[in-house]
Amino acid sequence: MCEYASFVVFGGARGSWFFAGWGRWCCVCTVVLSLLFCQIQGYRRRIPNVHEPIILNTTSTNYTAIAGETAVLYCAVDNLGTKTVTWRKAIPSVPLTVGLYTYYGDPRFQTHHVIHKRQWNLHIRNVSVLDSGAYECQVSTQTRDIRRPFFLTVKEQKSSIHITGDSYVNKYDRLVLLCNASSDSYPPDELDWFMNGLKVVTDLDEGIRITNSVSLRSRTIWSELVIEHAQMHHGGTYICRTSDELVTNIKVNVLSDGRMNVKRGTFSGKFLSSPDGRRSTSSRAAGSLVLVTWVAFVLHVSKQLDEVLLLSYTGLWVLDVDSPRDIAPSSVVC
């Protein structure tokens, strides 16, 4: 075949004697090059395209969040080029975001691009239990779709709030109320105090001080309300409220000075009844002493009045009023 081709091309029999050897070598080279080309093509099919996007496995695929907080699913993509990352929920298959745009009609779903980490992370604000399920980070190419599955578990938030302090306090005494709130996800941002519907703030001139402290380890926030010298208008219902709407309250009664908190059995300086309704020994003794003193005083005054009236009737001024009966009858002048 090679000889026939060279015979036709190079002028028939006259040139065949010169080009016959060259034609054979040409056919051999063509076959060798064809085989080499086929081998190279097969090798290239077995090697993935180095410019194709790759979803890295440097992030976790299982995430747990608490209801009400922001859940974040991390997806790292290399060699993205001009391609776009799409987040979708697996069941039902609904695209949530395309690139940085929210495709699904829920603004809680957003994609944040962390450039230096090559991450396209899905943020779900105010996550709820209904958001639990399987998600996919996907990159579409001309040949195939590159996916990586993720799973999100959302748990109900458990929070609590408590307030402690004295419900009864005497006027001018120190009033201290302590409020603490905790959560299994993160501590509340703030604690606010209200008294009879009005917000209470620190006022050093009035002797009111509020001190807050936070523990990230125990996920608890504390707030202490101190009134150095309680007045009558400080009595009322005190409310402690967190930034996530946890509320508790306590009613404080301010007792006027000189009274006793019967409920606690305290003594304020006057002799009053004991909590069981019986008068104390000291109270009974004091009452008896007052009564005896009063009777003695009345008798003394009555005696003095009798003596003055007697002298006024006789018309005499007697210096010794303590013994009027010692005056002789002959000295009385009519």
Image (cartoon, grey):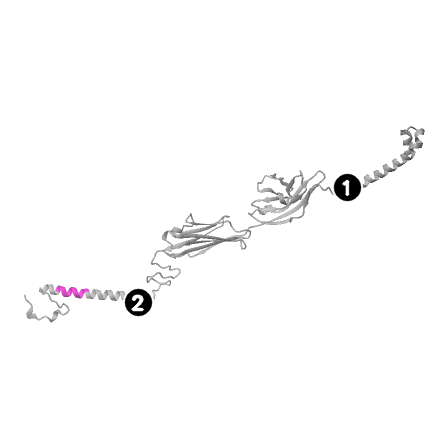
- Residue identified by numbered label 2: 285
Residue 70: give x, y in percent of width and height.
57, 46
> Which residue appears at 86% of the width and 37% of the height?
29
Nearest to N terminus: mark 1 or mark 2 = 1
Name the residue nearer the viewer: 13 or 216.
13
Q: Look at label 1 and name its amino acid.
A: Arg
Circle 2: residue type: Ala
Residue 273 magenta:
no
Q: Quadrant of the C terminus?
A: bottom left
Q: Which residues are magenta?
A: 301-309
Q: Nearer the viewer, mark 1 or mark 2?
A: 1
Residue 62 in percent (x, y) is at: 64, 49
Visible in this render: residue 1?
A: no
Tally the marks: 2
**Residue 147, located in which quarter of the rendered image?**
top right
- Compared across the picture, whether 149 is left or right of 325 comes to right
* C-alpha span from label 1 to label 2: 114 Å
Q: Quadrant of residue 111?
A: top right
Task: From the viewer's side, name the closer residue of 100 and 118.
Answer: 118
Is residue 324 shown to the viewer in this render?
yes
**Tag 1's secondary structure?**
helix
Magenta stretch: includes residue 307: yes
Pointer 1: what residue?
A: 44
140 to the left or right of 213: right
Q: Is residue 135 left or right of residue 304?
A: right
Residue 170 badge? none
Residue 142 in the image, given as x and y percentages of width and height = 71, 38
Crowdedness near tag 2: few (<14), some (14–19) or many (≥20) residues, C-alpha within 10 Å: few
Measured as percent of width and height from the top left, residue 57 is found at: 67, 48
Residue 148 against residue 27 in the figure, above or below: below
Q: Foreground: 333 or 53?
A: 53
Front position in the image: 311 or 198: 198
